[in-house]
Image: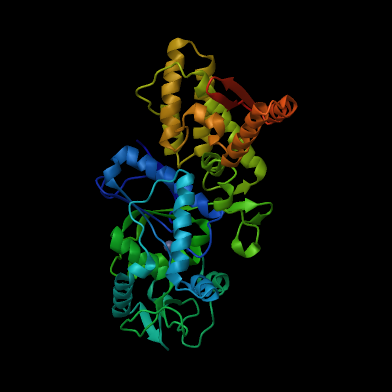
């Protein structure tokens, strides 16, 4: 395998070589659990899940360690808990459970580790202690701050000058800061907010130090791959790198930095503050997680992705077409599904999912139009390729019976029950009317000895 990944730090696509092929390490910044995840939050989860699956195939599942953290204490969480009058863990466990369920609907494998800030306090405090000892941090008025002047390469990851960074970070001007770009490692909690004891006084950590400490504790520094959305490059990842390098890891923090592009809604970035969010939690009640996953991977992960209902509809139709091809090829036995070379080459080229999708379509076309042996080879490659990245795992018949859309399935089943009741009452007019309604919904009803069954005709 010749996997090449785009590295934000060196600004080039580089051959991926893990430090230790027996222990490949990847970290992706995870959610702050104070609300349901929106579809933009799901983009890195799905994109890095593709990479996780590819690495597991290459190095063996036991040799790839993937950590995705959970921020379970911060201002927004504290605010929500205060509004509800409950402890913060009531809020965080509610939204973390929902997050797990929603990401699983999107076919994302569970990371190997899911460290949580509130359970990593000792490691966070120890790392701040080392930064103080190394003169890369200083205490002032109950706070501990990172001293950006102590790290000569500060700004290298994001490619910003100190002037840009000060302007871009909109950092709080505080009289106790030595440099205006300095950022918080530890701060006192406000009255009533959760706090932890520390040698620097009671309080809680800043956001950036959480990730550095969690990486060090779960995976060890330096790691092979660090990922996240490109809105995290500055200040979050710039600060993470500065902390790690100054806390006794001077050679490297992460060997490959990967960042996914924004998900846009209309002309705007999807964000909670803009109020234009589409929650995964709502989407999965009306469409299949597999279609959402397809839509999220339809653009290359580094490119912006324009989210729309039309995109989701196209994704559903694409999967209808692929499952349709599999349904028509149900007679072909496949024991040894394996991805095609063309498909792997596309993924190995910095996870080029649009090209990988084109190969999936080509394989489906060969399955539909080829001769006997060609069809078997095409089905083998189609299933091997698609399943490697989390698609076409369902039974094709089940897909056309509403696996694609749970709300639709319930609606069809309610209409079929209504029709059966009408028939029992010998109300033939109503039974026919309901059958007509189902036909309009593209549903074919088959009456049998044990009652009616149904299937969806493929959309054309
Ligand atoms: Zn992070």
Q: Residue furthest top?
A: 371
- Dividing the image into four equal quarters, which quarter contains ligand 1? bottom left
Q: How is the image coloured?
A: rainbow
Position of residue 80 measured from the top left corner of the image (x, y, whole percent) = 53, 71
In the shown orientation, is residue 268 left or right of residue 344? Answer: right
Q: Quick check: 457 above or below 413?
A: above
Residue depicted at 29% across the width and 73% down the height = 122
Residue depicted at 34% across the width and 64% down the height = 214
Q: Quick check: 15 above or below 87?
A: above
Position of residue 358 measured from the top left corner of the image (x, y, whole percent) = 53, 30
Position of residue 157 measured from the top left corner of the image (x, y, whole percent) = 45, 61
Q: Nearer the viewer, residue 283 or 209?
A: 283
In the shown orientation, is residue 258 left or right of residue 23? Answer: right
In the shown orientation, is residue 275 left or right of residue 451? Answer: right
Residue depicted at 38% across the width and 45% down the height = 52
In the shown orientation, is residue 86 left or right of residue 334? Answer: right
Quadrant for residue 27, please give it: bottom left
């Amino acid at each position: 395998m010749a996997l090449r990944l785009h590295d934000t730090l060196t600004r080039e696509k580089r051959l991926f070589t893990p430090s230790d092929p027996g222990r490949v390490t990847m970290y992706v910044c995870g959610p702050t659990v104070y609300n349901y995840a929106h579809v933009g939050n799901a983009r890195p989860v799905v994109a890095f899940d593709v990479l996780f699956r590819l690495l597991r195939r290459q190095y063996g599942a036991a040799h790839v360690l993937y950590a995705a953290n959970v921020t379970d204490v911060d201002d927004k969480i504290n605010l929500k808990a205060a509004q509800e009058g409950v402890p913060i863990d009531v809020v965080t466990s509610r939204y973390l459970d929902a997050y797990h369920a929603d990401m699983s609907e999107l076919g994302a494998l569970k990371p190997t580790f899911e460290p949580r800030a509130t359970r990593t306090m000792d490691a966070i405090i120890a790392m701040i202690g080392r930064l103080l000892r190394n003169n890369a941090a200083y205490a002032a008025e109950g706070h501990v701050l990172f001293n950006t002047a102590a790290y000569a390469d500060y700004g290298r990851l994001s490619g910003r000058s100190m002037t840009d960074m000060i302007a871009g970070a909109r950092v709080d001007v505080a009289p106790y800061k030595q440099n205006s770009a300095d950022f918080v490692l530890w701060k006192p909690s406000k009255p009533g907010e959760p706090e932890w004891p520390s040698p620097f006084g009671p309080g809680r950590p800043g956001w950036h130090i959480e990730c550095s400490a969690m990486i060090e504790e779960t995976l060890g520094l330096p790691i092979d791959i660090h990922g996240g959305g490109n809105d995290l490059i500055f200040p979050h990842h710039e600060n993470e790198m500065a902390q790690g390098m100054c806390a006794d890891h001077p050679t490297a923090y992460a060997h490959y930095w990967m960042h996914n592009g924004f998900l846009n809604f209309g002309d705007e970035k999807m964000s909670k503050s803009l109020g234009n969010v589409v929650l995964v939690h709502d989407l999965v009640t009306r469409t299949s997680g597999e279609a959402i996953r397809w839509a999220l991977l339809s653009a290359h992960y580094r490119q912006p992705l324009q989210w729309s209902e039309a995109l989701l509809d196209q994704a559903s139709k694409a999967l209808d077409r692929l499952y349709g091809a599999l349904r028509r090829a149900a007679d072909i036995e496949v024991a040894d599904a394996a991805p095609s070379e063309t498909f792997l080459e596309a993924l190995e080229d910095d996870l080029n999912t649009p090209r990988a999708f084109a190969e999936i379509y080509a394989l489906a076309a060969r399955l539909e139009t080829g001769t006997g042996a060609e069809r078997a080879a095409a089905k083998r490659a189609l299933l091997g390729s698609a399943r490697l990245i989390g698609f076409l795992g369902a039974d094709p018949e089940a897909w056309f019976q509403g696996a694609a859309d749970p709300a639709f399935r319930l609606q069809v089943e309610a209409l079929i029950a209504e029709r059966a009741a009408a028939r029992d009452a010998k109300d033939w007019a109503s039974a026919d009317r309901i059958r007509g309604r189902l036909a309009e919904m593209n549903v074919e009803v088959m009456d049998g000895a044990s009652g009616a069954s149904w299937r969806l005709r493929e959309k054309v």
